[in-house]
Amino acid sequence: MSTNSTFELVNEHGWRRGFANLFMRESAMWWRSRRWWINLLIWLVLINGTLLAMLSSASEAEHMNLMTPEQILAEARTVLGVMAGMFGAIGVVIATQGAIIDEKKSGIAAWIMSKPASRPAFILSKLIANGLALLVIIVVVQGVVAYLQLANYSGSPPALGPFVAGMALIALHMLFYLTLTLMLGTLFSDRGPVIGIPIGILFSAMFLMGYVGQFAYLMPWMIIPAGSFQGLAIDAMLGQPLATTTPIWATIVWIIVFVTIAIWRFTREEF
């Protein structure tokens, strides 16, 4: 075992050099600290607490014959889509805004790059470790709890396939903002644009979708509820046919572009 308490010697070459050590380091920041359960509790209250409050109030509307059970369950899925989709994206941006900038400013990035570690491995370790942690906390755990809530309310579990498909689209939406934030961390030296640009893009959906025409299909805006648009994730949860898949493929392309630019820019960083 190496005498270094942070890194151990591994046999990796090329772009993978140092990835295992860097990934374990990034993962430890989540799972070997209080960070994971604090975030888990926050998102349980924010997402499923809101869903529980909505279902509780909707029960009264059902008893007064103001809403049918089907309408209530559809509305519950929309609430889940908004809370996990929009607020989840904000949480991702806040959680990762300093992932690269802070280490560049503190000199940690320069120290790591002085070790046998490649620059692509540095970026990819942050992407995968943070992505896994945030997706587990915000999408997987919240999705399981929400599914149980919906099953309890309706008396029978919702169709699992459509529900998982809808949550997968919410996860894709979050990955767009995760990769965008990490890319901006390689391009800027201050947190302002790193947090401001993704949040601006996120909230632009509510104001610009009706004015940008076909361009809206090239953004992730249509995946989650925005304005009068129900969102592809909710369509999937309800088992309805998707009006279009273009935003889904466009989002995947954006994610690849963001990761590519982040690696390209970081390889040219001078330490």
Image (cartoon, helix red, strand yellow):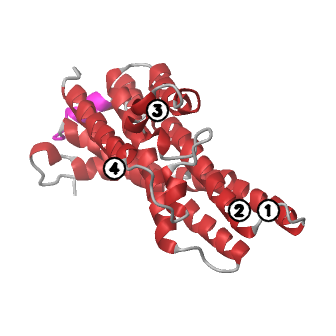
Task: Name the residue tied to disc 4.
Answer: 128
Tell whether 96 sits left or right of 35: left
Task: Name the residue tied to disc 3.
Answer: 97
Looking at this rendering, what residue extends furthest in the bottom direction?
Answer: 156
Q: Are marks 2 and 1 in contact (CB under 8 Å)?
A: yes
Residue 111 colored in magenta in the image: yes
Q: Which mark is residue 71?
A: 2
- Tell me where residue 186 appears, x and y as whole percent: 32, 27
- Tell me where residue 81 appears, x and y as whole percent: 58, 52
Residue found at x 16% / y 41%: 116
Q: CA distance from mark 3 to mark 1?
A: 42 Å
Amino acid at circle 1? Met
Circle 2 SS class? helix
Residue found at x 44% / y 26%: 194
Amino acid at circle 4? Ile
Circle 4 SS class? helix
